[in-house]
Amino acid sequence: MTLRTTLAVCALLLGMCSGTDGKEATIPTTTAFCKIVWLIGVPCDQVTTAIVSQIKAMGSYNLGSVTPTVIQANHTSGIGQIESVNFTMTPTSMVLGCHVQGSSVSAVWFSLYDNGTNFCNLRNVIKGSGLTKAPGFMEFTNEWLCLGCALSAC
Ligand SMILES: *[C@@H]1O[C@H](CO)[C@@H](O)[C@H](O)[C@H]1NC(C)=O
Ligand SMILES: *[C@@H]1O[C@H](CO)[C@@H](O)[C@H](O)[C@H]1NC(C)=O
Ligand SMILES: *[C@@H]1O[C@H](CO)[C@@H](O)[C@H](O)[C@H]1NC(C)=O
């Protein structure tokens, strides 16, 4: 498959979250969570550096262990809730590309319906790092992977 075809397929998938237009998710889970996958057209070591410096620059995050493939952090929300946030980097077969999986899970039961907190925890880091403007940037998620992603206004 050519790169162009791949991107066209990705663009179709991308509509899944934004297309739900604020309709509420009714997914039974025990804690709120969000998973997002990004494809970014820069090498993973640069992606790691950008994510780490962005997390350090944001006061609401506590940076945990950082390896070339996994970045761990905790995020504290305004009301004192804590979410665990991980970014996992895998080089893609595409030249110079990086596949990043972000995952955010709330530590406490009362944030089951989190209004997109976990989505924003991930999205704000990637957006703030400038990676959303990187060549070939694509984001995938939907209501099954990311509770409240259609409701959130980060
Ligand atoms: C994140 O929170 C967990 C659970 O409260 C704690 O065990 C861990 O040490 C925290 N990590 C960081 C980097 O603050
Ligand atoms: C992040 O990774 C750690 C260690 O593998 C795991 O314990 C934690 O549940 C993960 N957090 C998320 C949000 O996936
Ligand atoms: C989510 O938003 C609704 C409506 O704005 C609000 O009533 C509710 O308290 C919020 N929940 C959380 C966990 O912030």
Image (cartoon, rainbow, N blue to C red):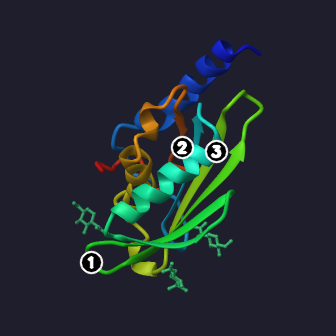
* Residue 52 sits above or below residue 92 on the image: below
| Image coords of residue 127 (percent x, y) | 39, 44
> On the rendered image, what quadrant is the N terminus found in?
top right
The percent coordinates of residue 44 (x first, y second) are 64, 44
Residue at (36, 78) in percent of width and height: 81
Q: Is mark 1 within 8 Å of ligand 3?
A: yes
Q: Which residue position holds label 1?
A: 79
Q: Which residue is mark 3?
A: 44
Is 13 or 137 nearer to us in this picture?
Answer: 137
Quarter residue 80 falls in: bottom left
Q: Amino acid at mark 2?
A: Thr
Question: What secondary structure is found at the residue carrying circle 3?
Answer: helix
Give the left or right position of residue 59, taking residue 98 as reference.
left
Q: CA distance from mark 3 to mark 1?
A: 33 Å
Cα–Cα span, label 2 and label 3: 20 Å
Is residue 117 toward the left or the right of residue 93 in the image? left
Report which residue position mark 2 lands on: 141
Q: Please indicate whether residue 102 sits to the left or right of residue 111 in the image.
A: right
Residue 93 against residue 7 in the figure, above or below = below
Q: Residues within 10 Å of mark 2 (few under 14, many from 20)?
A: many
The three-letter code of the residue at mark 3 reads Cys
Q: Nearer the viewer, residue 87 or 30?
A: 87
